Every structure is written in structure tokens, then in C-alpha cells.
Amino acid sequence: MTKTETRPFDAAEFLDTDEAVAAYLQDALESGSAEVFQTALQTAARARGMTEVAKASGLGRESLYKALRPDAHPRFDTVQRVLAALGVKLTAEPAPVARSA
């Protein structure tokens, strides 16, 4: 019997286009969870290369790693800079309103 080898799933392997990164981060935003979004942002940065994202965002590589740690609380300015380095922007739209019967 042949043994099947598996490896852990890493979404970063599939974030190979600007559109894929934007869709991934949009899904994370729609979750409504800051933790989910921060994890997605870190994954997207890894997909692009942390050194490249750090350079493009004007952050030091170590600062970028610290800002995107699971227990970190990055400033909005930092998030914006990372998003810009990833080629993504945040947008706002009206939330759907629940209609009563």
C-alpha cells in the first residue's frame, strides 16, 4: 500500500495575481473579524515576499513582521501602507439593511 503524503494548506501559494490578493482580502474583510483580516493581510504579504512588501511600504522588514503578528494591533496607517504595497485599496459601501416583514 502506498502512503499518501500531504502538506499543510498555505493560501499564499495561490495569491499569484493582484486580483487573487484583492479577492482574498475582500473575503477576509467581509468576515467582520479583525483577526481574520490581519491573518489574510499577513498571508498576502508573505505571498508577495515580506522583504518586497516592507520596502514598498516604507516599513522595515522586522517592523512589518511585528505589525502582522497574530497578537499585534497595527495602526490604520500601517495597514494602509501594506495594502498600498500589495496594490490593493480599501473601499466603503453601504451595508445591506435588514428589512422587517
Image (cartoon, rainbow, N blue to C red):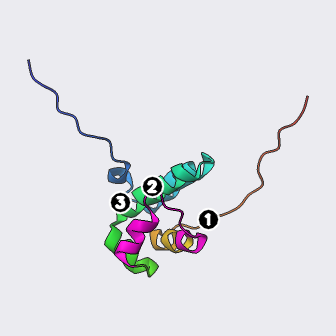
Q: Which of the two discs, 2 and 3, sits closer to the camera?
A: 2
- Is residue 67 rendered to the left or right of residue 9? right
Mark-to-mark CA distance, 3 and 1: 19 Å
Instruction: Give whichever of discs 1 and 2 has the lower sequence position.
Output: 2
Q: Which of the two discs, 1 and 2, sits closer to the camera?
A: 2
Task: Please name whichever residue, 87 or 7, is drawn nearer the observer in this view of the structure.
Answer: 7
At x 47%, y 59%, the residue is: 41
Per the image, is 67 magenta? yes
Which segment did they paint magenta?
60-79
Name the spot of residue 38 as percent of width and height, x first.
50, 56
- Return the residue at label 3: 47
Q: Amino acid at mark 1?
A: Leu
The image quarter in which residue 45 lies? bottom left
Q: Which mark is residue 80?
A: none
At x 66%, y 63%, the residue is: 91
Name the spot of residue 17 as percent of width and height, x first.
41, 60
- Return the residue at label 2: 70
**Label 1's element?**
loop
- In the picture as drawn, the residue positioned furthest to the top comes out as 1
Instruction: Give whichever of discs 3 and 1 has the lower sequence position.
Output: 3
Mark 1 vs 2: CB contact within 8 A: no
Quadrant occupied by the C terminus: top right
Name the spot of residue 2 as percent of width and height, x first.
9, 22
Name the spot of residue 1 as percent of width and height, x first.
8, 17
- Is residue 42 rendered to the left or right of residue 31? left
- Return the residue at label 1: 90
